[in-house]
Amino acid sequence: MSHPRPVAPGALSQRWLLLAVIALGLGALAAVALVVARTPGVTALLAPDAFPRALVVHVNLATLVWYLAMACALWTERLPARRGTAAALAFALAAAGAAGAVAAGLAGLGTPVLANYVPYLDHPLFLAALGCFAAGGLAAALVSLAPPRDAAEWGFAIARWPFLMGAVYLVLSLARGQSLVDAVWGAGHVLQFGHVTLLMAIWLRLAERAGATPLPVGPAALLFALAALPATAAPLLLAAGLAGDEMLHRFHTELMRWANWPAPLAFGLLLVVRTKGAVRRADGLPASLGLFLAGCLAGLAIDAQTTLVPAHYHGTIGAFTLALMAAALARLSPAVPGGRPSRLPLTLYSLGIFALIAGLAWSGALGAPRKSPFSAEGADLGATLAASLIGLGGAITIAGVCLFVIVAVPRILPLCLNRRPPVPTAPCAAAPTFAAAR
């Protein structure tokens, strides 16, 4: 008896996935300089200006490009054929922007500006490249929108809203004369609500792929909306002209403090209670839930601009990165012969990022400032051990990311050429999609 050929996402979705994975890999290479700069005994190997430049490249590739490109890979799985040309143009614009940002970083153009969320090189080429990438990603998000068919698809659809609001906020803030540093700081806050909404949708799909019963659409969609809708508040304040810069700064901080974590924590708890063993069986899901919780706990301890701040956001963004890696591997596993990819990249990344967070939190408790390399001058044993833990955790994390890239890229390349996998020999063979309902 023959079995139907699995339906694969189009080549465009695979190209977004390839762009995302390459960006994460290059971001990990840039992070090597950051790990060296924070590790006792080897900090002298770097030039004085290498740390800020590496930080700019790492953050933009490992968060902005990786996150949005990966989101677009998931969003375009169900791309209607009639929108193919527009979607292809959006991808070309985004890919050119990502390449331009990397080229500007490698060429050493501009002065590094360590703005929160989106640090940048103060040079027209770098800024224009980032703008092209963001515009292409947002265009792909809009072009690929389709009616949701299950609870997880509602999450992936709703997650588009904060990304759109982030762009609206950036334009409005620049139009009212805010500095670029303040504008990207505020827009970065808005984007976090998109990240957690996507994270929740990925959690649900990972649990379902491990055998969990799908959640009812109503309660799930409500939690997705509660996660995403706070992104609307700051753009509305700007559009209405109701907030000065100081008030807006306080508003962003308080909104993040109180509105960014309840929905994902409640959603994670709902998954654990309803799905029981499925959460434990899902690759990367237990560690992603634990990382998000660790990030929230580190955030409660922040009382100054110390390394507790990166301990907090490496927990939350680490949870998102791990979930995206698991989503990529889950989508690739049935798409080519040879079985599921190795769990080792997810395991290494999880161990490394937990160690990194512990070292950052320890250093922060000792008063180590953020955005600065380790200085051995005057450092006691505790500070040196904490910094060493950061170095060890960072090295293991980078190893996990590099192994993920090595595993994923050879599997993605044939799919970018729209080569279909062979007809499956087992009736349980799954369609190689992730965000889209099967």
Image (cartoon, grey):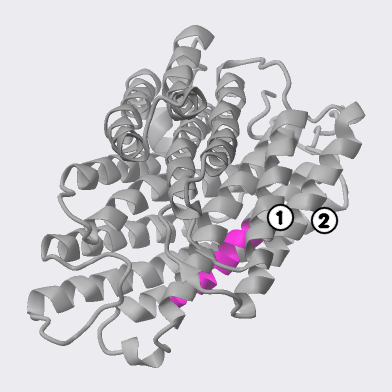
Position of 411 relative to 166 (above/below): below
Q: Position of residue 13 (x, y in %)?
A: 76, 42
Q: Which residue is mark 2?
A: 414
Label ID, residue 88: none
Mark 2 neighbour class, 10 Å CA radius: few under 14, some 14 to 19, many 20 or more: some
Q: CA distance from mark 1 to mark 2?
A: 11 Å
Q: Is residue 195 visible?
A: yes
Q: Is residue 227 left or right of residue 81?
A: left
Residue in the picture at 65% in, 72% down: 104
Q: Position of residue 98 (x, y in %)?
A: 68, 59
Q: Position of residue 241 (x, y in %)?
A: 46, 26
Question: In the image, what residue type sits under mark 1?
Answer: Leu
Mark 1 neighbour class, 10 Å CA radius: few under 14, some 14 to 19, many 20 or more: many
Q: Which residues are magenta?
A: 21-33
Q: Is residue 338 visible?
A: no
Position of 270 relative to 162 (above/below): above
- 1 or 2: tag closer to the N-terminus: 1
Q: Is residue 141 left or right of residue 121?
A: right
Label ID, residue 18: 1
Question: In the image, what residue type sits under mark 2?
Answer: Pro
Position of 100 relative to 279 (above/below): below
Instruction: Report the front residue among 237 and 210.
Output: 237
Residue in the picture at 22% in, 56% down: 308
Secondary structure predominantly adopted by residues drawn in magenta? helix
Location of the N terminus by quadrant is top right
Residue in the picture at 12% in, 81% down: 379
Location of the C terminus by quadrant is top right
Q: Under tag 1, what secondary structure?
A: helix
Instruction: Report the front residue among 390 and 369.
Output: 369
